[in-house]
Image (cartoon, rainbow, N blue to C red):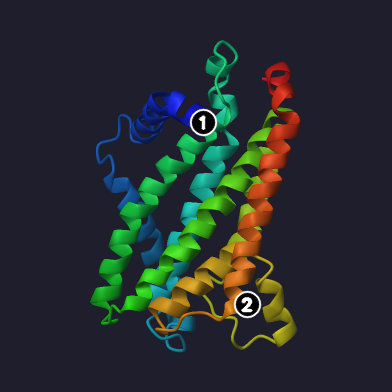
Amino acid sequence: MNRLRQYQFMFEELVKRDFKQKYKRTALGMLWSILSPLLMMCVLATIFGNFFGKSIEHYIVYLFSGQVIFNYYTESTNGGMNALMSNAKIFTKINVPKYLFLFSKNVSALINFGIILLVYFVFVWLDGITFTWKFLTLVYPIVCLIFINLGMGLILSALFIFFRDIEYLYRLFTQVVMYGCAIFYSIDRLPQHIQNVFYCNPIFVCITYFRSVVINDTIPELWLHALLAGYAIVLFGAGCYVYKKYNYKFLYYV
C-alpha cells in the first residue's frame, strides 16, 4: 500500500496523459468515444436488424449491450499490450513499477467505458425499459471484467516484449472473440452443446449478464456468477504470475 502511495502522483499523471493522448489533435475530442460505438451500432443494426431484430426483443439495446462490453475489452487489452513498449524510455531510465503503465491504460479505457455506459443507459430509457434495483448488480460483471482486462493486459504486455508477432495474432484472436460474443445474434436456437461452448468466452458471459439484468429484468443464476468470478481470478492470477516471473527480463528486450 505504501508503494502505491509513493507513486500515486506519477500514476495520476500517466492516466491524464493516456486519456489526453488518445484525443490529441482531434477536432471532436471525447465525442469520438460516443460517436464511434454509435456509428458501429447503426451499421450493425441496419445490416442484421432485418435478420435478427424481429426475433430478439429490444434488439437495439441487445446489440448495444454486446458492443459496449466488447469495445471496453478490446480497448483495455490492446492498450495494455502496448503499455510497456510505449513507455520503455521511462522505465529503462527510472526504477518504477512497470505495472503502473499498464494500469494507467486500463483506467483510461475504464473512463471511456463509463462515458459510453451513460449513453447506453439513455438508449435503455428510450427503448422503454424500466430501471429497477437489479441494475445495481451490473457492478458485479463490470468489476469482474476489470480484472479480466488487467490479467489479459499483463499477459499480453509481457508477450509483446518478447514476441512482436503477438500484436497480429491478437488481432485475429479478438475477431474470434467478437464472433463468439453473439453481439448481433442470439444463441437460443443453437443445440445445447454448442451453446455451452459460448460460455468458454468470458466476454460472452459478461454480455449475457448485462442482457439478463437490463432486458429480461432477471439476475443471473449463481453458476454464472461463479463462472465469471472464476475467469476473473484465473486470468488476473495468470497475468500476475507472468509479470512476476519475467519482470526482470523486460529491460533486456525493449
Frontmost residue, 197 versus 209: 209
Percent of width and height locating residue 75? 49, 47
Would residue 88 be seen by someone viewing this image from the given angle?
yes
Q: Residue at x 30, y 29 (%)?
A: 25
Mark 2 surroundings within 10 Å by alpha-carbon count, few (fewer than 14), some (14 through 19), many (20 or more): few
Q: In this view, does 26 lie above or below 170?
A: above
Label 2's element? helix
Q: Hey, which quadrant is residue 191 in on the image? A: bottom right
Percent of width and height locating residue 238? 71, 47
Callout 1 amino acid: Leu
Percent of width and height locating residue 194? 72, 80
Callout 2 amino acid: Trp
* Side of 202 where 159 appears, left or right: right
Q: Tag on residue 223?
A: 2
Which residue does the numbered mark 1 point to in the structure image? 100
Would residue 67 be seen by someone viewing this image from the given angle?
no
